[in-house]
Amino acid sequence: MLPVTPSEQEYLKQIYLYTSGKAVIHTKQLAAQVKARSASVTDMVKRLAKKKLLVYNRYYGCSLSKLGKTEALKVIRRHRLWKLFLAEKLTIDWKEIHQIATWLQSIDSDTLVEKLSMFLGHPVLDPHGEPIPDIYGKFPDTGSLEILDLKINQPASVFGYRHSDKEFLQYVERLDLLINTKFQVISIIAYDHSLELLIEKKKKRIISKETAQKIYVRLLEKDED
Amino acid sequence: MLPVTPSEQEYLKQIYLYTSGKAVIHTKQLAAQVKARSASVTDMVKRLAKKKLLVYNRYYGCSLSKLGKTEALKVIRRHRLWKLFLAEKLTIDWKEIHQIATWLQSIDSDTLVEKLSMFLGHPVLDPHGEPIPDIYGKFPDTGSLEILDLKINQPASVFGYRHSDKEFLQYVERLDLLINTKFQVISIIAYDHSLELLIEKKKKRIISKETAQKIYVRLLEKDED
DNA sequence: TTAAATTATTAGGTTAGCCTAATAATTTTT
DNA sequence: AAAAATTATTAGGCTAACCTAATAATTTAA
C-alpha cells in the first residue's frame, strides 16, 4: 500500500499501545512514548494525518484512523514475533531484546513476517505474555482476566503483562510473578485496595491495585498444582 | 565505535565486494553498485572519508581504509548470516532473500550477530556458497574446492557445507563426513557419476554427484593423517 | 475572571541521503 | 596538442526526522 517509514511505524505502534486504538493521545503523552520533543511530535502527527493514518485535532491530540490501526497492528505483530524469536531461538538477554525488536519491526515484508510466524509455530503470545495480533490484525483472546478480577483464594497463574517495559519486568521478577507462576489472592487491604498474594503456596507479597490491573491471569482449578 | 548509518554500511560493503578491499573504485562504478547517481556517491564518499572509513582522491576514486575494511566485513558477515537464516530456517524464496538480507544487515548489534551465528551453527558459507567472515573479519579459506573437484586418491578433509540445513547435516553425519573428516575419492561410478569415498582409511561410502558438489574440502598432503 | 501555569504549535535550523543541472577535470580521439 | 567525449564535482534543492526558541492556545488556580 502506501510507504510508511520506520519512524512513522514506531509512532503508530506507540499510539496504539497507549490508546488501545480507541482513545485520543495528546502531544505530550506521545512525545514521552516515542522519546522525542513535542515539536517533533506535532510535525510527525501532521505528516501521519496527511497520509490518513490518523485524525488530528489541533491542540486536542490525535487518534488512529482505521488505516492507522491496521498499520499499527502489523507493526505490533512484527515486533512481538521478533521478540519471541530473539528470546526463544537466539536466547538473547531481556534487556537487549526490546531495542533489537524495535529495529527489526521496521522491516515490512509480508513474506518475511509470515515465514517467521510459521517458523515460530504461529505463536499467540510474545515472551512477556503480550498477545500477538494475527495476520489480519486480530488479537488472540486472552480471557482479559487481571489479578484485580480474582476472587479471594481463587488459584490462578500469571499469563502475561499489560506493559512490558524494563522497569515493570524487573519489578514482577522481584515479586516472583513471572509467567506461569501459580498464586492466589489471600486478602485485600481496605484502605488502599492493595492485594496480598500467596505465591506458589509459599511466599507472601503485597501489590498495589494498579499493579494488579497490569497482570493478566488464567484461572486454575483448586487442586491444580 | 563510531556510528555508521545503514546507507554508509551498504556503500562500504559494495566497495569491499568490488575491490576485495585492495583496489580503488571509481565514482561511476560505485554509483552502479549502490544504484545511485554519481553526485550522490561523491557526497557519500566525502562523508566516509571524513569518518576515516576510506581514502578519497578527488577525480581518482577511493579505497577502503583499514577501519573501513573492518566495518565492511562486519556488514558482509551480517548480510550472509541473515541470508542463510532466511533460506534455511525460514525457507524464503531466492528472489526475495537478497533484499530482505540487505535490510537486516543494517542492524548492528554484536549480541544479535553472534547469537544468530551460534543459532546457525557458526556457518562458513552462505546459501550461495559465499564465504562468511568470522567475528574478527577473517574469511574462511574454502579454496572453493568441492569433493567433485578432487582427483582420485587425493587425500582431503571436509571443510564446510554449501547448505547447513538440519536434513543435510543429519545426512552428512550418517555418511561420517563431518567437519575435518579425512577421506579420499577412490572411484567414480560411470553411469550416474556418483563417487565412492574412503573415509578415514576405513569406511567406504557412496555419495551422489549432487552431494559431492555441496561439500567443501581442503587438500591434504599424501602423508598427512 | 483574570493571572499563572501548562501544553501545543510555529518558525527556523540541522543532518543524512538522495536528486538535477551546471561546471570542471581527465582521458580519448583526431 | 587541441577538440571531443567521458567522468567527477559543485551548486542548489528536496524530504524525513529530529532539534531549540518563541509564540499561541488551553487549562488551572488565585
Image (spheres, coloured by chain):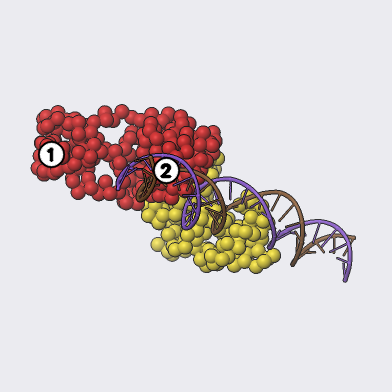
Chain colours: A red, B yellow, C brown, D purple
Tag 1 subunit = A
Relative placement, left or right, of A15 versus B188 is left
**B108 left or right, relative to A215:** right
Any part of residue B160 in sight:
no
Label drawn at residue B146: none
**Count of marks, rendered view:** 2
Q: Residue at x 27, y 30 (%)?
A: A144
Look at the picture and state if B211 lies above or below B12: above
Q: Residue at x 69, y 65 (%)?
A: B59
Q: Residue at x 47, y 63 (%)?
A: B2
Q: Position of residue A184 (x, y in %)?
A: 13, 35
In this rendering, would A157 be left or right of A34?
left
**Depth check, front residue: A113 or B17:** A113
Quarter of the image where one finds residue A119? top left
Mark 2, residues whose alpha carbon is within 10 Å: few (<14), some, or many (≥20)? many
When the figure is inspected, residue C1 is found, relative to residue B36, above or below; the finding is above
In-image side of A3 versus A158 (left or right) = right
| Circle 1: residue type | Tyr
Looking at the rendered image, the quarter that the N terminus of chain B falls into is: bottom left
Q: Which residue is mark 1?
A: A191
Q: Are marks 1 and 2 in contact (CB under 8 Å)?
A: no
Neighbour class for label 1 at 10 Å: few (<14), some, many (≥20)? few
Secondary structure category for the residue under label 1? loop
Q: CA distance from mark 1 to mark 2?
A: 35 Å
**Residue annotated with mark 2:** A27
Determine the chain carrying the residue at label 2: A
x and y percentages locating residue A100 in the rendered image: 39, 49
